[in-house]
Image (cartoon, rainbow, N blue to C red):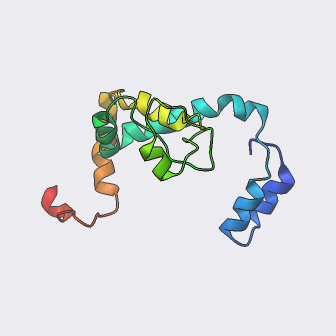
């Protein structure tokens, strides 16, 4: 628990529903330490995802540079601060209300090539994912 708010953490654990837990969680103030390290934590998470999942890596690698914006109407730090229509139809060089820090991390991470030691993890990602509607049976493709 990063915030040190034990009563709210306990209330979240005992919440009767996910919505109740979310509403309680919205009242928890992040610690100064977390605020100072949140970008690095998210960067580490995204880098792990890229190194573990070939599809995610390939989609990012093929995206145009500086084109990743995270749609988030209610999150001005991680997202664009705009709804999906606003995110899609606002000029990429125009001022946006959000900082789009997750989009920044994703854009920078897209050009990182996974280490050779991660090749096995990348292959496993495809095998372990849920079947998609337009997939050919996984036994045929492996």
Residue 120 versus residue 99: which sits nearer the camera?
Answer: 99
Query: Is 110 placed above or below 6 here?
Result: above
82 displayed left or right of 5: left
Residue 20's image quarter?
bottom right
* Percent coordinates x, y for residue 104 in the rendering: 49, 31
Taking depth in this image into account, of 4 and 108 the one nearest to the observer is 108
Q: Which residue lies furthest to the left in this view?
A: 140
What is the tally of numbered marks visible in this picture? 0
Residue sitting nearer the eye, 85 or 128: 85
Residue 81 occupies quadrant? top right
| Residue 138 left/right relative to 72 | left
Q: What residue appears at the point 77 percent right and 67 percent down from the top-left corner? A: 14
Which residue occupies 54% across, 41% down? 80
Place of residue 30 in the rendered image (x, y in percent of width and height, measured from the top left): 76, 41
Residue that lies at the very extreme toward the right in this rendered image: 7
Which residue appears at 54% of the width and 36% of the height? 100
Quadrant of the frame with the C terminus: bottom left
Task: Find residue 135 and report its horizontal and vertical position in percent.
Answer: 21, 62
List x then y, in percent, for residue 63: 31, 36
Identify the residue at horizontal 78%, vertical 32% (top origin).
Answer: 32
Q: In the figure, residue 64 lies in which quadrant?
A: top left
Q: In which quarter of the image is the N terminus?
A: top right
């Amino acid at each position: 628990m990063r915030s040190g708010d034990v009563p709210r953490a306990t209330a979240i654990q005992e919440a009767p529903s996910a919505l109740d837990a979310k509403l309680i969680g919205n009242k928890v103030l992040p610690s100064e330490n977390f605020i100072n390290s949140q970008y690095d934590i998210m960067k580490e998470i995204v880098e792990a995802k890229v190194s573990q999942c070939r599809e995610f890596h390939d989609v990012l690698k093929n995206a145009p540079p500086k084109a990743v914006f995270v749609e988030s109407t209610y999150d001005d730090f991680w997202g664009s601060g705009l709804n999906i229509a606003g995110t899609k139809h606002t000029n990429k060089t125009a001022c946006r209300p959000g900082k789009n820090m997750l989009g920044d991390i994703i854009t920078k991470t897209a050009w990182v090539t996974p280490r050779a030691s991660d090749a096995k993890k990348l292959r496993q990602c495809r095998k372990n994912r849920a079947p998609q509607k337009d997939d050919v049976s996984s036994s045929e493709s492996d």
